[in-house]
Amino acid sequence: MEESWNFEFLSRMVDSLVSFLSEFVDDWLANDMRVAVFKILFTWLIISLVAIHFAWKVYGNTVNDMYYRQGTGGQNGGTPDTAPHLSGWESAAGDAMKTHRE
């Protein structure tokens, strides 16, 4: 019983996809203003994605190095040195209340 339901569902999905694609192709070949605007925007999207891809290939390592700086923590980034056996939560919870004295 379930097999016929799955087949019917799959058949309806394929029919819907085929009818959508045939209507899309008919509109694509119509050469009206809607299609022209769509073609322009679609081309712009593809060119932008390709440009982003190539820019990331060229400058990706530089951006990654700027974001993940190595070394001690400070004003300009990095991670502070902590005890290797303690996580940040354990070291913060184990410290007594600290006061500032001059």
Image: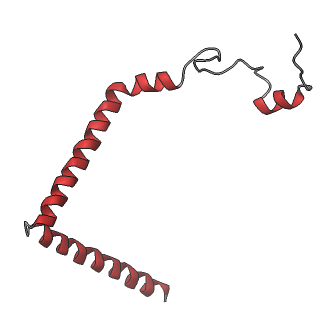
Q: Which residue is drawn at 46% across and 26% down?
A: 64
Q: Is residue 47 left or right of residue 88?
A: left
Nearer-the-camera pick, 3 or 88: 88
Q: Dividing the picture into quarters, in which one does residue 71 lie?
A: top right
Q: Where is residue 10 in the image (x, y as percent from the top left)?
A: 37, 78
Q: Which residue is drawn at 8% across and 70% down?
A: 30
Q: Position of residue 34 (x, y in %)?
A: 16, 66
Q: Which residue is drawn at 91% across and 26% down?
A: 97
Q: Where is residue 51 in the image (x, y as percent from the top left)?
A: 26, 37
Q: Dividing the picture into quarters, in which one does residue 82 lie?
A: top right
Q: Is residue 97 left or right of residue 24?
A: right
Q: Which residue is drawn at 21% across and 54% down?
A: 41
Q: In this view, does 40 lie above or below 102?
A: below
Number of marks drawn: 0
Q: Where is residue 5 in the image (x, y as percent from the top left)?
A: 44, 86
- Classify the position of the C terminus by image quarter: top right
Most extreme residue toward the right, as rendered? 96
Q: Dividing the picture into quarters, in which one does residue 32 lie?
A: bottom left
Q: Is residue 7 left or right of residue 71?
A: left
The colour scheme used to paint the residues is secondary structure
